[in-house]
Amino acid sequence: MLVDFVAFPVFGLFQTDYYRMSARVDVLTVYLSCYLLGSGLFVQSLYLGECNSALGMQSFDIPDSAITASSSHDEKTVGPQNARIRTELYGGAWCPKSAINKDSYEFLQVDLNRLMVITQVEVQGRFGNGKGKEYATHFLLQYQREDGGEWIHFRNKTDGEIFEGNSNTYIAELRTVSPPIIGRRIRFIPYSKYPRTVCMRIEVYGCPWMDGVVSYYVRQGDRRGAEVDLFDFSYDGMIEDNYLTQGLGQLTDGEYGDTNFRLDKVVHKIKGYEWVGWRNDSTENSGPVEIKFKFDRVRKFKSVTIHCNNYFSKDVKIFRRALLYFSIGGMYFLKEPIQYDFMPDNLVEYARNVTISLANNVGQFIKLKLFFDDKWMMISEVIFDSAVADGKFHPEEPPIPTHAPIMASEESIISKAEDVKEIDILRSYGVTGNGVSDSSAGIKKQRNAASTSTLDGDNISIIIGALSALFVILIIIVIIVIVRLKRRNNNNRQTLMPVIDSGLSAKLQNTSGNPNEKISNGNMYYSIASGDGKMDDKQFNETGAQNEYEEPYIGKERSLMATFIPVKNQSQKADFKRRSPVMVNAQDSHVQYDALYAAADIINSKVPNIPSIQGVSGNSIYGVPNTELLLSMDNSVIEIPKRNLRCIEVLGVGQFGEVHLCEATGMHEYLEDHDVVNRRASSPVLVVVKILRTSADDRARAEFLREIRNMSVLKDPNIVRVLGVCTREEPNCMVVEYMQYGDLNQFLVDHLPETDDSASNDRKLGYGCQIYMASQIASGMKYLESLNMVHRDLATRNCLVGRHFAIKISDFGMSRSLYSADYYRIEGRAVLPIRWMAWESILLGKFTTKSDVWSFGITLWEILTFSKVQPYEDMSDEQVIENSGHHYRNDNQQIYLPQPAICPKEIYDLMLECWNRHESERPSFREIHMFLLRKNMGYDPKLEILGRTSLGIVHS
């Protein structure tokens, strides 16, 4: 099925104002992409969840003539026709003539009379009305796909062949066949390590194979790094010289790959198992990936759907061009191919289906050529929408050799398609090809030479006119793009809201002073309110004055422990033009609010100063407004030899660095106390290592060193500490504490309330323990509050759990792909945890200690719900942003998180205070900490049974 265009209403997305409509083109792109990805428009011929119907052994839909065997002890009483499950006929089962052992080859064969997908099989012994004693403890499967073809041994995803059979004569055992078998005939082969007499009754489950593909031929996939093998592991044909022939595999198994191909699924235990991938320079003559498909019959093809990965941040993109050739005999592909050019998508990284119309072309063989658009190309599934063609067809004759070749070369075909691409786009989006039916060709042949000549002249005039018009259109498009870019650059210098001088410090664009350059998915942002963080209501007055942020220049770092460079004074401020601000009043009308905050373009287009809180290694970074205070504090760190570190797992990846979980040995030489994972001096301890890649530029290095200095001054029992650095050799590293039980989010997920009777004692977690952990988070945030430092990403994923439920606040949750769904990406500028952010942070880009209080309220809610659901789980990201607008308007339409089941009223009242619209009315962390201590007086964590949660080595 080909979806050329989908029209659907997006309420509130567009306004009548032309400029507002222009500013939302990018948002519409995201909406449309997500709609197509999630609306069920995918073409899928194999639904494994529904492909489980009984194929007819018990129901007799499979006739006796279709059931045969290698031998039978007695043809009439225990012959193959009696092998129907849950049926007592004559002897009650099929019994081979000879005893079975590990070297015997006796089989029961079922002819399904057509290509079927087999997803399950069921086996049963011989009950014989209570007289039977025979059953097969194990069995193997073989299948045949084509008449006269090879019998293929079934192997599962872990390369195993032997199925568990029965343990008695009367209970039927159902076994899953994964990957599913696509075949016409199947054999059950009883197996035993020791000689024994066996009998079997069977059933087969599955569905018809509608695609009709019987084999495909392709180059084997390539290895990516040391851990990811993008091979076709389940291919059941032959592999010769790294080339797959005469079989089927992962491209037709009905399993779709995740966008993040690095995920290690437990069911497969192989990273990237569902993907077959190729590197564009893995062969000597790098060219397109060519896949040749063979079908059971000559078919008429409507479309092909290819499930591709577009993880462009990892050098993986969808093919830029596809060519499809058709043939009856499979030797010669004489017709001009269908060409499809894919419009590159550098915005949405999701894997998706790409559907290509095949215009009812006919053939039994299809050759598909896919051209690279980046270093890597990955495919998970190829699905054909076709039907058996009527009529008689003959294989193509070989082309007659002449001086002028009959068939144009591939390059000339591509060149020819380029010349007429605009005309073909009008006919079908992105698809070109022969496009001329046989009847049209016949009419053309009947034209005489004179009329043909006249028409050729007319066509030339039309083509010249069309090209001229196209040239003019292209010039107009270029002008529009330039104007929009200039307008967007100007908008990036606007201030959305008036700012009070006394309430703000400087906004740090980056170390080079260029406001448009980025460090790791966005500019580092340090525009944090100083003082008590209170927001004056004068900010919402129409007459409020506007003051621009100061733009300090931070020079290149000279050494690891160098002092901070002071912020430049007013005379050194960047020379930005002063523009009229967009004034917003809290009592403005509904129309004015909608004009500013309709849908998701609140962030994407109307708040150009929205910050990035992501560091060079992918982790979140603290906001540090008061650098003078940090200068007065001890920020010395020790040098740790790299030989003492052994990497266990990559937790996350950033633009210029990575976050690793490592084992550190010899740490007793560098630690004053031992409140980390292991207290024994001779044992290794788990630490987190933030690594700066050697390819990082000077700006990234400056940011990394600044992060080390900022983190090294933090010395609080509830904040992870910097244990040391590795700066004497590349790559530079920062070694940070890690805790025994990993992050709090996963810890809570693995536990249940103490009131849950279904849970074992070692998985129960008491209410007192939850409040105890929350009070520790409040204590750590109280320390940050005293330094006027802002965390900006407070959540359970950024808290670590240690012995006796000790909690330490960390900052690398953002870097882990495990929590990617908790962050909202703003079109290349920033990654933000909007479900945990205060409304002023979302709408105004303002982060203060009071916005951290808001986040604490969400974190407390997570703790009391055991992190079983995401905050605002029933709301999309756009609806969360819209809800922030209701908080801003204070129109009584804002939605709050519900009160957790085990949460007392006074604790929920605390949450509501944290979510107060006015910052000045939110409690401080000092007050929150004292309140939680009073509510949990007398609690002793050592008396709580600590669940046997695995060490914090979790998949990221």
Image (cartoon, grey):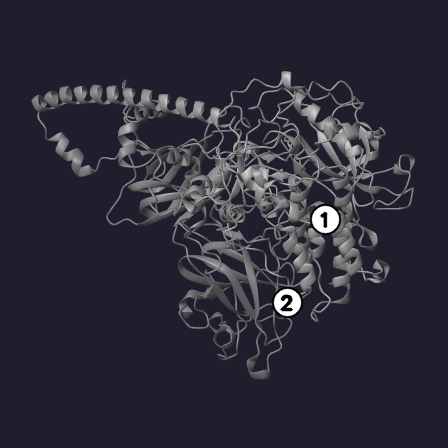
Q: Amino acid at mark 1?
A: Asp
* Number of marks in picture: 2
Residue wearing tag 2 = 137
Quarter of the image for residue 335 reads: top left
Quarter of the image for residue 166 reads: bottom right
Residue wearing tag 1 = 743
Rendered location of residue 142, percent (x, y): 53, 56
Position of residue 539 in the picture relative to residue 786 (left or right): left
| Image disc number at residue 785 | none
Q: Cα distance, mark 1 to mark 2? A: 44 Å
- State the residue in front, 113 or 750: 750
Neighbourhood count class around disc 1 (C-alpha, 10 Å): few under 14, some 14–19, many 20 upward: many
Position of residue 764 in the picture relative to residue 677 (left or right): left
Rendered location of residue 776, percent (x, y): 78, 50
Neighbourhood count class around disc 2 (C-alpha, 10 Å): few under 14, some 14–19, many 20 upward: many
- State the residue in front, 528 or 88: 528
Rendered location of residue 707, percent (x, y): 73, 30
Choose mark 1 or mark 2, whichever is in front: 1
Instruction: In the rendered view, tell whether residue 263 sits above or below residue 81.
Output: above
Position of residue 646 in the picture relative to residue 595 (left or right): right
Quadrant for the C terminus in the image = top right
- Disc 1, SS: loop
Q: Earlier in the sequence, mark 1 or mark 2?
A: 2
- Disc 2, SS: loop
- State the residue in front, 856 or 595: 595
Seen as rendered, the residue at the extreme top is 571
